[in-house]
Amino acid sequence: MKSNRAIRTPGGLSVRLDVRALTAVVLLVLAALTASVLLIGTGDFPISAGEVLRTLAGQGDAGQEFIVNELRLPRVLVGLLVGASLGLGGALFQAISRNPLGSPDVLGLSQGATAGALTMIVLFSASSEQITLGALTGGLVTGAAIYLLAWKRGVHGYRLVLVGIGVSAVVTAVNGYLLTKSDIIDAAQAVVWMTGSLDGRDWNQVWPLLGLCAVLVPLVLANSRGLRMMEMGDDVSYALGVRVERVRMLLMVSAVLLTASATAAAGPVGFVALTAPQLARRLTRSPGPNLLASLCMGATLLVTADFVSQRVFGAGQLPVGVVTGVLGGAYLLWLLVAERRAGRI
């Protein structure tokens, strides 16, 4: 079966369809939905998958309606949105930097959002809404600093990664300083937040993240053609009519907003932004940034990790950030070994 097919519409428009990539996206969506249903049914009061589906359809009893719709569904939706945002943000940064290590974890954006949240926790003993605002502000300020420091007649991949690593080191040191200056109660709250967790998430976290994704995801996908051409180099992209710096800045701002908002909603969940685009690329075997597949892979990874955490350790016992860190670190080690055996490093 051919991987690529051309489809012509009655109006004469020709669209190239990558069958394998489309199949991979559909399978990832099904996997994410399956994991979400199982996750909603997991907890101190177990609910079967059939009962979860009936409750979501409005046919459950009063107790199930409360548990599913008020307690567990918002948490799962936050997990899906955070995972999707991190997967898409990671794919954008890796495509812009043309480097598989060009993810928000490495570039310092997650650490910048953490610094903003720590500032609100340690210096102002802030509420959850103020902590979210601080994390979003910290991520945006860090992203702007990286972009300005990496600018020299444009922003290029290796310079972006190197500047990001330097900024990450500085911000990490600032975070350590803030922790040393906090009292024991604020420090405990900060450490829990820094781990990355979905515990206690409700509809207040769902709606802002959903609204932001509803705006940014179509905007990013609409500029995917220009991003794909930019992987061939700036000169070729200019020759093909792509406004390189305009597209690059637009997509970088979108990636920073996606990453900062995800971090603000669930804390710095590690390795999802780094591994999701790579796993998506291996699954689709398609060149280019694989934006939609990375988005779906990120959502699937996060809800699956949360399901594993609750099944193995019990509800609320192990933050999802610990699970993604272990799985992501193991994947990174495997990737390095595979690359070395192939003679590429």
Image (tube, rainbow, N blue to C red):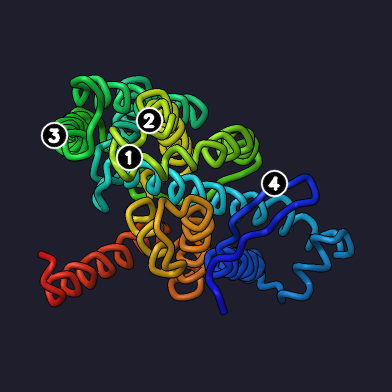
Return the residue at label 2.
248
Q: Quadrant of the C terminus?
A: bottom left
Q: Is residue 339 above or below residue 149?
A: below
Q: Amino acid at mark 3?
A: Gly
Residue depicted at x 66% and y 73%: 46
Observer able to see residue 222? yes
Relative to the observer, which residue lies in front, 80 or 149? 149
Relative to the observer, which residue lies in front, 196 or 185? 196
Return the residue at label 1.
96
Query: Circles 2 and 4: CB distance less than 8 Å?
Result: no
Q: Earlier in the sequence, mark 2 or mark 4?
A: 4
Per the image, label 2 sits on a secondary structure element best described as helix
Relative to the observer, which residue lies in front, 12 or 187? 12
Per the image, label 1 sits on a secondary structure element best described as helix
Query: Circles 1 and 2: CB distance less than 8 Å?
Result: yes
- Where residue 275 sits in the image (x, y, percent)? 35, 59
Distance between mark 4 and mark 3 Cα atoms: 47 Å
Mark 3 or mark 1, whichever is nearer to me = 1
Query: Circles 4 and 3: CB distance less than 8 Å?
Result: no
Return the residue at label 3.
166
Horizontal side, residue 274 vs residue 21: left or right: left
Q: Is residue 6 above or below residue 124?
A: below
Mark 2 or mark 4, whichever is nearer to me = 4
Residue depicted at x 43% and y 29%: 241
Query: Circles 3 and 1: CB distance less than 8 Å?
Result: no
Q: Residue furthest front?
A: 12
Observer able to see residue 169? no
Q: Earlier in the sequence, mark 1 or mark 2?
A: 1
Q: Earlier in the sequence, mark 4 or mark 3?
A: 4
Q: Amino acid at mark 1?
A: Ile
